[in-house]
Amino acid sequence: MFARESFKRTLGKITGIGRPTARSAQATVRPRRAHTIMFEDDGSIPNNPRLPLIHYRGVVRLGDADDPAAVFEELFASNGWKDSWRNGIYDYVHYHSRTHEVLGIARGNARVRFGGNGGKVLELEAEDVVVLPAGTGHQCLSASKDLLVVGAYPPSGAYDECAPLPEHHARALKSIPKVPVPAKDPVYGADGQLRDLWRAWALA
C-alpha cells in the first residue's frame, strides 16, 4: 500500500489530477467540537504534561474524493503543517519528543491506543483527525485492511521517534517543553480551537 500511495501522491503533484486546491480542501471542513484528553507520564511514555490530545470526529467531508489522502495533505499544508506522509500507524508504542503530529484518517478505521499502555483506546474512522502534542504515546492495536492515514508536522520542531526506553524518556523530559504551540490549527487554521485550547492548558 505504501508504494502505491507514494506513487499516487507523486503523480498527483506532477499532473494535478485528483488533487484539490487549498481552498477546496478547506471547504471540506465541518464545524466540530474538539474532544481533549490529558495523559500523565507513566514512567516509560512521558506524554505531554501541559497539552492535551485533540480529537476531531468526522471533521473532514471526504465524500467520493478521487484521492482522499490528498484532501488531508492540502488541508494540513494550507495551515502550515507539512512534511506529510501516507501510511498506517505503527503497531508498537512510540512517541515524538521534538515535534507535535497530526493524523488524518483518509480511509478505513483503526483502534489506536494513545498515552502508552495505561492510556486510552480511540476508535478512529475515515474523516477523523487527531492532533498529538509532543510526547504522546501512540500505537495501532487493530485496523481495517484499507486503513490509510496522512500525518504531518508543524513548521517548528524536528521529527524524532522515541521508544519506551529509559534513555529516551530522560531526553524527552528536556525536549518536550521546548516544542512551541503552533501558530495554526491543522484543520481550522489561525482561528481554530487548537491554539486557544493549548494556550489555555499551557497557562493553567
Image (spheres, helix red, strand yellow):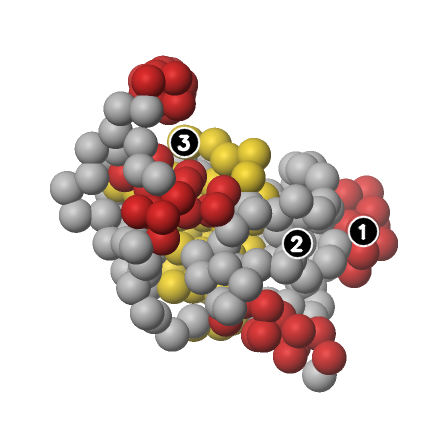
Q: At x 48% / y 46%, what residue is drawn?
A: 78
Q: Secondary structure at mark 2?
A: loop
- The answer to whether residue 187 of the structure is visible from this angle is yes
Q: Identify which residue, 72 or 78, lies in the foreground.
A: 78
Q: Identify which residue, 178 or 114, lies in the foreground.
A: 178
Q: Secondary structure at mark 3?
A: strand
Give the Cα distance between marks 3 and 1. 26 Å
Q: Secondary structure at mark 1?
A: helix
Q: Which badge, 2 or 3, is on the more N-terminal residue?
A: 3
Q: Amino acid at mark 1?
A: Ser
The residue that label 1 is drawn on is: 175
Q: Amino acid at mark 2?
A: Ala
| Total count of labels | 3
Residue 186's disc number: none
Query: Dot 2: few (<14), some (14–19), or many (≥20) neighbours within 10 Å?
Result: many
**Is residue 67 rendered to the left or right of residue 81?**
left
Q: At x 59% / y 68%, what residue is drawn?
A: 195
Q: Quadrant of the N terminus?
A: top left
Quarter-of-image position of residue 67: top left
Q: Which badge, 3 or 1, is on the more N-terminal residue?
A: 3
Q: Are marks 2 and 1 in contact (CB under 8 Å)?
A: yes
**Residue 167: percent from left, percent from top:** 81, 43
Residue that protrudes farthest toward the bottom in the picture: 204
**Residue 117: percent from left, percent from top:** 54, 56
The residue that label 3 is drawn on is: 87
Q: At x 40% / y 55%, what residue is drawn?
A: 129
The residue that label 2 is drawn on is: 134
